[in-house]
Image (cartoon, rainbow, N blue to C red):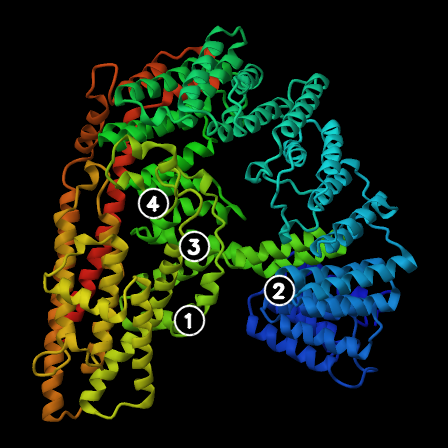
């Protein structure tokens, strides 16, 4: 039912308005007072009660808010409708509060009850539909929309039902029968009312498409309903797609010709036109995400030729060429690239059919003459380069250079052509395989061209892209390649200096910043990398697509506060979006934009299954455990918030791991780190063949899903394993006094064994193989050096949790000859000693260059060593309970003494290991800042010749010192302030800061172990 005019929820609006004004102005105390006064006059008004709940929720009193909401809900469910006002305003207010309290189910119950009382009330039914939208209950959405349609027979409600059916088909288990139902509903409505909305026509056609009834869809499009699609080009694209899917390629080609005549720069339509003309067998997309789109471009180069007879092929190619030449003559703005790029594609198709004439090279030269100065030229040609032989690449590259050198274009266009030449040098695969001397010369030339053309950007606004910015990015990339090939640290320092130089001139170049994030991370200057990442001002969905540049490095670093801040920002965005995403969906329903409804639902589903989201949730709680381990009680408090670790086990089930999505934009990563699990610079250089584009970008396509799933699965087990290990340690000592273990303790031990098996599988081992491996390493029969960092940390974690399990169990490898199950303590001690010794033997000084195993040491001390300390604390708490005295038998006293001795030895072992790392860190910090600065500067200033480290720095310093005022006040001032020594000093200070943070963590661990030692 609807409130009468002038009333809000049955209360005069003049009494309610001051409360809303106070809430809107965030004067919640005033609002609460006004609400109390209103309730005094209307004690049985659900709306007044709902207002109070809203205010309580806004002030953070969530439990009170829920209690008050439940009171209003009970009133609404009372049978005396004359005493209780039930309207959409009251229910929507309750819904707001329930939604914020994550109790949408209660809001739905309120609306369902109201709709049962007033089954023909449109407002209430629309509110109920909104509830089902928020719950993503597509079947109930459909049923409610049908009820609305039966009441008023409005087209929008029918389309709500049709869209709900589409969602069942695309996002759940709905099938062809549902599509038939949707079609029948539409046909019935068209017979009586026709259709009046363009989106309704598009939806009708998409339903027919999903049933492969393309001819029927074409009949709809060519009839009166098709005229509802007001933009002619959109209608033609849709028609062309339907004809192609119906295999009527000739008619489809004619339609795409019309599209190109209207939109000559539509590259996707040209590919579809050429594909239809040549009878290419396309995998025409039928994915759900494009079902409601009016056009659907197809990747022509992925098509399979139907092997037309040569005469037919030649005839159709001639027809396509003639049409393209006509387009070229009609285009006069000089901006449309498609007609000229089309000529290259046509010649490429001829080449694929075995024709080897020179027309392809001519088309490429023509395209370079017209568009060689554009920044997109190299990417336009990249897909065609594989068609050329190595000889042809060299020939065409030489011709491009000749054209560039002889052209009489403006300085700006000549700069653009020069940049294109440098890019093509990489695209054609020449740059990466150059001899070291020539690669140095090329990178030096890039920087020199940039500096000499700074004057072209003198009048630009700081927010505008400067001319030639790509040059510094390419030069830095080439210098990193030089470092990989020569292992000369000076090249890597120059790569940093080049990017810092560019950012000093213009601080808004995000490409430079991302490169610096990776480079500073690699050289153990993570605080500086985090600082540059912060300047990107990453917000909203970019947190999902961009954070992979810094998150993995932070997870294994001692920068706990920075990691926590980043995780909180990311998780807040994701949680808020997933909570509020349905608002966008319902808004799309309201505005009758049904393609957006499906897009929003699928986008939300993709984010909800994000691998980064799951990893971040896991890492956040592990970080909390790392930080809060000074006392056992603090760790147990964290575990209780996680439902004793069960929460993470539920969100990382096999079903969820198999449905993970990968939303990272990997194209923005540097060539040497195509994914977070791959870093070529950490691998030895294996000849020039390793530099080929095919090898460098072989990991670019995906993040290696199996690795990601294993890491998430392994990490998500840790909190539960910690909890069960603490319980097992306690239980084992209880059993020395009370031999009969409870059923609960036995179940916990069985679960611990089961989770250890899962943990071993995530390492690629069976349980017994994992036990055997750590036993052999502890005996010196195998070495940690044979494994990567993840495996080393994983084995140490497994050994720690295995020791806790073995306290109540008897694994054959972990028994003394007398049958006592305490040898696992010795295994853990041996592993601690072994891994620390091996890590420190091969450890490099952080300040001397990249390659330090600092992240490995951080992980070992903050994870397995910390978890082992928690197990020890649990033992100590059971053996030495505060304020209590145990009655001990002789046997239990003897066993407790044995445990106490082993625990004492384990504390000493951890303390010694961490002390060695602490000493290593102290040695790293020896020497003054100036001495460390001089060492690094000497790396880039040692060379006096024109090649080698230092030649590029020399150009930068000359540019900064000899700059003239014609560069403009901004650039001139920036150059005057630039100093290579300042950049290197920041690097040195950042490395020192990282070491100091780790040293503080080690110091805190040593103090904690000392306190534990003094407790007995």
Q: Which x, y percent locates residue 440?
A: 29, 21
| Few, some or many residues within 10 Å of mark 2 (<14, 14–19, 20+) | few
> Which label sits on residue 172?
2
> Which label sits on residue 567?
3
Please tell me in which quadrant of the rendered image residue 307 appears. top right
> Which label sits on residue 678?
4
**Residue nearest the viewer, comparing 220 with 132:** 220
Q: Which x, y percent locates residue 355?
A: 53, 24
Of the numbered discs 3 and 4, the one sitting upstream in the chain is 3
Local secondary structure at mark 2: loop
Separation of marks 1 and 2 at Cα, in angstroms = 33 Å
Separation of marks 2 and 4 at Cα, in angstroms = 35 Å
| Few, some or many residues within 10 Å of mark 3 (<14, 14–19, 20+) | many
Separation of marks 1 and 4 at Cα, in angstroms = 35 Å
Please tell me in which quadrant of the rendered image residue 582 appears. bottom right
Local secondary structure at mark 3: helix
> Which label sits on residue 580?
none
> From what the image shows, is residue 108 above or below residue 349?
below
Residue on which disc 1 sits = 641
Separation of marks 2 and 3 at Cα, in angstroms = 31 Å
């Amino acid at each position: 039912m609807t409130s009468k005019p002038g009333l809000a929820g049955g209360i005069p609006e003049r009494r309610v308005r001051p409360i809303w004004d106070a809430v809107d102005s965030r004067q919640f105390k005033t609002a609460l007072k006004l609400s109390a006064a209103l309730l005094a006059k209307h004690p049985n008004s659900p709306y007044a009660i709902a207002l109070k709940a809203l205010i309580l929720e806004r002030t953070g009193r969530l439990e009170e808010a829920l209690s008050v909401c439940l009171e209003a809900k009970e009133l609404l469910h009372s049978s005396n409708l004359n005493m209780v006002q039930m309207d959409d305003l009251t229910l929507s207010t309750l819904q707001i509060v329930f939604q914020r309290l994550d109790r949408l189910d209660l809001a739905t119950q309120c609306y369902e009850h109201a709709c049962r009382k007033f089954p023909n009330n449109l407002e209430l039914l629309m509110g109920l539909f909104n509830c089902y939208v928020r719950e993503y209950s597509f079947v109930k959405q459909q049923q409610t929309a049908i009820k609305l349609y039966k009441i008023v027979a409005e087209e929008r409600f029918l389309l709500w039902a049709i869209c709900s059916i589409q969602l069942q088909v695309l996002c759940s288990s709905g099938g062809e029968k549902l599509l038939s139902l949707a079609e029948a509903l539409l046909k019935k409505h068209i017979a009586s009312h026709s259709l009046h909305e363009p989106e309704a026509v598009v939806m009708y056609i998409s339903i027919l498409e999903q049933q492969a009834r393309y001819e029927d869809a074409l009949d709809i499009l060519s009839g009166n309903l098709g005229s509802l699609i007001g933009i002619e080009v959109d209608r033609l694209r849709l028609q062309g797609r339907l004809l192609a899917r119906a295999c009527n390629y000739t008619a489809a080609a004619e339609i795409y010709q019309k599209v190109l005549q209207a939109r000559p720069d539509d590259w996707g339509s040209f590919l579809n036109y050429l594909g239809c003309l040549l009878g290419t067998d396309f995998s025409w997309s039928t994915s759900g995400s494009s079902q409601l789109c009016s056009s659907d471009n197809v990747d022509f180069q992925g098509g399979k030729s139907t092997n037309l007879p040569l005469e037919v092929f030649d005839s159709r190619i001639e027809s396509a060429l003639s049409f393209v030449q006509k387009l070229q003559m009609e285009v006069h703005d000089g901006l449309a690239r498609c007609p000229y790029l089309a000529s290259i594609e046509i010649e490429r198709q001829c080449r694929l059919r075995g024709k080897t004439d020179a027309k392809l090279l001519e088309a490429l030269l023509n395209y370079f003459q017209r568009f060689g100065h554009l920044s997109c030229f190299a990417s336009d040609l990249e897909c065609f380069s594989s068609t050329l032989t190595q000889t042809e690449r060299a020939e065409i590259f030489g011709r491009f250079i000749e054209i560039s050198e002889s052209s009489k274009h403006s300085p700006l266009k000549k700069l653009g052509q020069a940049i294109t030449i440098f890019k093509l040098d990489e695209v054609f695969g020449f740059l990466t395989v150059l001899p070291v001397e020539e690669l140095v010369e090329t990178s030096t030339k890039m920087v020199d061209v940039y500096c000499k053309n700074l004057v072209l950007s003198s009048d630009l606004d700081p927010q505008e892209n400067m001319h030639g910015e790509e040059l510094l990015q390419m030069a830095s990339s080439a210098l990193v390649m030089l470092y990989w090939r020569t292992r000369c640290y000076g090249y890597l320092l120059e790569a940093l200096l080049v990017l810092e130089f560019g950012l000093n001139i213009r601080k808004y170049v995000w490409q430079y910043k991302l490169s610096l994030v990776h480079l500073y991370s690699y050289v153990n200057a993570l605080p500086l990398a985090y600082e540059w990442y912060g300047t990107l001002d990453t917000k909203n969905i970019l947190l999902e697509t961009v954070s992979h540049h810094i998150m993995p490095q932070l997870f294994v670093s001692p920068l706990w506060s920075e990691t926590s801040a980043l995780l909180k920002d990311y998780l807040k965005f994701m949680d808020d979006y997933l909570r509020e995403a349905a608002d966008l969906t319902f808004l799309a329903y309201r505005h009758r934009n049904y393609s957006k409804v499906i897009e929003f639902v699928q986008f939300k589903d993709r984010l909800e299954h994000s691998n980064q989201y799951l990893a971040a949730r896991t890492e956040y709680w592990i970080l909390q455990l790392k930080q809060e381990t000074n006392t056992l009680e603090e760790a147990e408090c964290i575990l209780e918030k996680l439902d004793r670790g069960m929460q993470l086990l539920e969100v990382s089930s096999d079903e969820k791991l198999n449905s993970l999505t990968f939303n990272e934009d990997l194209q923005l990563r540097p060539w040497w780190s195509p994914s977070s699990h791959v870093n070529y610079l950490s691998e030895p250089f294996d000849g020039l063949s390793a530099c080929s584009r095919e090898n460098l970008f072989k990991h670019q396509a995906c993040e290696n899903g199996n690795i990601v799933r294993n890491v998430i699965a392994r990490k998500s087990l840790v909190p539960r394993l910690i909890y069960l290990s603490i319980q097992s340690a306690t239980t084992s000592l209880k059993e020395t006094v009370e031999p009969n273990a409870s059923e609960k303790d036995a179940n916990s031990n069985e679960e611990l064994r089961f989770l250890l098996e899962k943990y071993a599988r995530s390492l690629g081992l069976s349980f017994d193989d994992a036990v055997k491996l750590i036993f052999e390493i502890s005996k010196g029969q195998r070495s940690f050096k044979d494994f990567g960092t993840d495996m080393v940390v994983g084995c140490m974690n497994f050994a720690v949790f295995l020791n806790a399990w073995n306290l109540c169990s008897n694994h054959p490898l972990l028994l003394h000859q007398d049958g006592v199950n305490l040898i696992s303590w010795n295994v853990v001690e041996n592993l601690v000693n072994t891994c620390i010794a091996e890590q420190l033997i091969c450890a490099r000084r952080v300040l001397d260059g990249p390659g330090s195993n600092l992240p490995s040491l951080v992980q070992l001390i903050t994870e397995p060593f910390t978890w082992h300390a928690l197990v020890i604390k649990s033992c100590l708490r059971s053996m030495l309970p505060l304020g209590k005295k145990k009655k001990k038998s002789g046997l239990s006293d003897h066993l407790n003494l044995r445990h106490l001795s082993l625990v004492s030895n384990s504390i000493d072992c951890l303390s010694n290991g961490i002390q060695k790392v602490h000493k290593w860190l102290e040695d790293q910090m020896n020497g003054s800042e100036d001495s460390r600065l001089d060492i690094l500067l000497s790396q880039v200033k040692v060379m006096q010749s024109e090649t080698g480290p230092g030649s590029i720095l020399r150009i930068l310093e000359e540019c900064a010192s000899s700059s003239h005022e014609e560069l403009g006040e901004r650039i001139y001032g920036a150059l005057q302030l630039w100093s290579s020594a300042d950049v290197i000093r920041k690097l040195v200070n950042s490395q020192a800061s990282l070491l100091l943070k780790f040293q503080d963590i080690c110091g805190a661990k040593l103090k904690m172990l000392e306190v534990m030692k003094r407790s007995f």
